[in-house]
Image: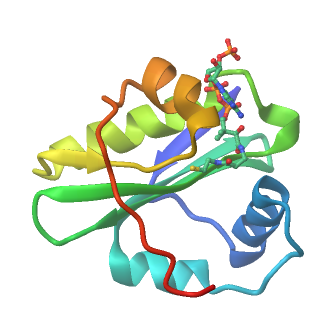
Amino acid sequence: VIAYEWRGRFSNDEVNALHAEGFGHPVLADDWRAQVLRHSLGWVCAREGSQFVGFVNVAWDGGVHAFVLDTMVAAVGRRRGVGTRLVAIAVDNARAAGCEWLHVDFTDDLGPFYVTSCGFRPAPAGLIALRP
Ligand SMILES: CC(C)(COP(=O)(O)OP(=O)(O)OC[C@H]1O[C@@H](n2cnc3c(N)ncnc32)[C@H](O)[C@@H]1OP(=O)(O)O)[C@@H](O)C(=O)NCCC(=O)NCCS
């Protein structure tokens, strides 16, 4: 059974491990707890027993816009609907908090996930890489 929790407890090590696996880089020592507590509307944690299997961060402008960042599911737990459920819980909680828009940006290959499965409407978006 997978348990999902909005603003659930997590350790920095758990999210750093998931991020390294999901985005293919060495394990970093980022302070996710401080970051999300200070800047996010919330986040969703997924656990299967004692195993941390999923996370999504919901950043916020302090008003009606929330932003999905860092949707990630442990490789062993993928393609079982965990990512879709994480995003659905983010949608419900952003709406409950009074947000009017939930944004995400993603590469074309993730269209089947964000558009078809999670229900985002495709919209033009822009991005500037601020560091080379
Ligand atoms: C993207 C990610 C979060 C999806 O999590 P997941 O739990 O496997 O997703 P779901 O099981 O809810 O997938 C639902 C549907 O979305 C689509 N989908 C899922 N992962 C996909 C992927 N990597 N590429 C394209 N489509 C995908 C499929 O249509 C899938 O349905 P199916 O399994 O019946 O074919 C996960 O693959 C991941 O953590 N990837 C690495 C990190 C990453 O790239 N995150 C997104 C950053 S923007």
Identify which residue is drawn at 32% across, 39% down.
Answer: 91
Relative to 46, 105 lies left or right: left
Tell me: residue 105, above or below residue 9. above
User: Looking at the picture, how far across and down is residue 37, in whole percent?
Assistant: 41, 79
* Residue 11 location (% of width, % of height): 68, 72
Among the 4 quarters of the image, the one containing residue 76: top right
Query: For residue 124, what is the image quadrant?
Result: top left
Classify residue 40 by image quadrant.
Answer: bottom left
Residue in the foreground of this view, choosing between 54 and 1: 54
Give the x, y percent position of residue 111: 53, 29
Above or below, 120 relative to 106: above
Residue lying at 85% horizontally and 69% vertically, measured from the top left: 25
Q: Nearer the viewer, residue 64 or 42?
A: 64
Whole-percent x, y for residue 95 in the image: 18, 42
Would you say 7 lies left or right of 103 here? Answer: right
Left or right, 35 with respect to 72, comes to: left
Quadrant of the picture in which ligand 1 is shown: top right
For the point 41% across and 65% down, the residue is 127
